[in-house]
Amino acid sequence: MAGNANPFEEMKKMVDKAGKTLGLDQGMIEVLKSPKRELHVHFPVKMDNGTIKVFTGYRVQHNEARGPYKGGIRYHPQVDIDEVRALSSWMTWKTATVDIPYGGAKGGIICDPKKMSLSEVERMTRRYASEISIIIGPEKDIPAPDVNTGGREMAWIMDTYSMMKGYAVPGVITGKPRELGGSLGRPEATSRGLVFTVREAAKKIGMNLKGASVAIQGYGNVGAFAHKLIERDFGSKVIAVTDSKGGIINEKGLKYEEVWAHKVKTGSVIGFPGSKPISNQEILELKVDVLLPCALENVITKDNASKIKAKISGEGANGPTTFEADAIMWKNGVLVLPDILANAGGVTVSYFEWVQNNYNYYWTEDEVNKRLDAKITAAFHEVWNMHEKHKCNMRDAAYLVAVKRVADATRLRGFYP
Ligand code: GLU
């Protein structure tokens, strides 16, 4: 995780706050904060030089009151158990905010895939998949991509799980390549959902997105596609972007096609012709209309929150803003579109993918995108109405919507035995 705040503790503060407003009793609040199951795995992988390396990975299943566990798998050197706990619970709140019939889970491996060969990443992925196969499955827990994983890894996991079962099980994982039962529109889905929430927010505050200035922190799957979509569909002007190696700024605007081609060619956005360098910290403080933090958690903290000048901050990343930073931004009039709403487009289309796998009938891309728009727009307005009703920020409002849904489901199911 980036920054110092512990994201699991941050999550608990949010649930405490929402639980109190909703009048939930303390026992229920404890149930909602606690991950139900945590699997820690330490497993060997043969490296290309003949040595054996032991990797550590996790799969945390936070809550399944509303349906099977759901959530991605991340590969990063800073993965730790509290981060995965927080990420798993954010999936519970995310699936509840957009009202899809899932709970929340998350997985991660402590590793640096950028320093590993393709075959090492494949062996690590397959071994991790076999280690967690005892708790995943199309009716139990359905993983998906997250930071540093994508269709390639999902294909290996689908294959490993299917080999162990003896037949193809496409529904065990989402975010697969199209050829294996992946959904059209899934690769861009998180970014598409993000720009839909920005579109709705802009309408609410009377901002014209055409020509609006945008800064994007993070240029992986979410940040790069957000650049493409906000430029192409709304005519906004992206003036700065960063990735893990550094960043670039050009007040006249940066074109997606050109920046992406540069990143593919050189491995980073840095050194893009005609741009000046900018750091991952500085980009957050630019005077832009829309800021899109699309990298890691804890990047906006009490130390820099008062320097955020954007009118809208749309969270493509999970957990980019700490609890204390949120309060400062709310006071300063920055409209924060919280992660559990703003980046829920990915898991929403994962749900569509799983539905298509389960009934073996596939939709057109247009159908997927329209259903996504309907889901995200409806969720945005529910959260917005809650924010007006309780005169609270959008994150508090999203938690009120989500925590209520999960608490209601828990109460209806009752407590076993
Ligand atoms: N990793 C993504 C997220 O944080 C997608 C999860 C999924 O599709 O299950 O929402």
Image (cartoon, rainbow, N blue to C red):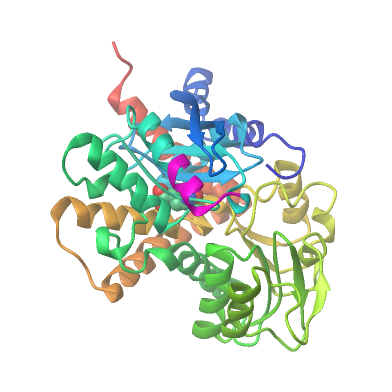
Q: In this view, does 70 lie above or below 388?
A: above
Q: In which quarter of the image is residue 67?
A: top left
Q: Which residue sits at x=65%, y=42%?
A: 77
Residue 336: give x, y in percent of width and height.
64, 58
Q: Is residue 131 above or below residue 288?
A: above
Q: Quadrant of residue 405?
A: top left
Q: Is 117 one of the magenta-colored residues? A: yes
Q: Which residue sits at x=59%, y=46%?
A: 396
Residue 378: give x, y in percent of width and height.
39, 61
Placement of the C terminus among the 4 image quadrants: top left
Q: Is residue 248 above or below residue 329?
A: below
Asked if residue 360 lies left or right of residue 122, the reply is left
Q: Which residue sits at x=52%, y=45%?
A: 74
The residue most toward the front is 50
Residue 325: give x, y in percent of width and height.
75, 48
Q: Is residue 340 above or below residue 32?
A: below
Magenta span: helix, strand or loop, mainly? helix
Q: Which residue sits at x=77%, y=66%?
A: 283
Examine the rendering and report whether any part of residue 395 can be seen.
yes
**What residue range appears in magenta?**
116-124
Along the line of sight, the residue nearer the viewer: 313 or 410: 313
Along the line of sight, the residue nearer the viewer: 158 or 394: 158
Asked if residue 397 lies left or right of residue 298, the reply is left
Placement of the N terminus among the 4 image quadrants: top right
Along the line of sight, the residue nearer the viewer: 215 or 115: 115
Residue 306: give x, y in percent of width and height.
83, 56
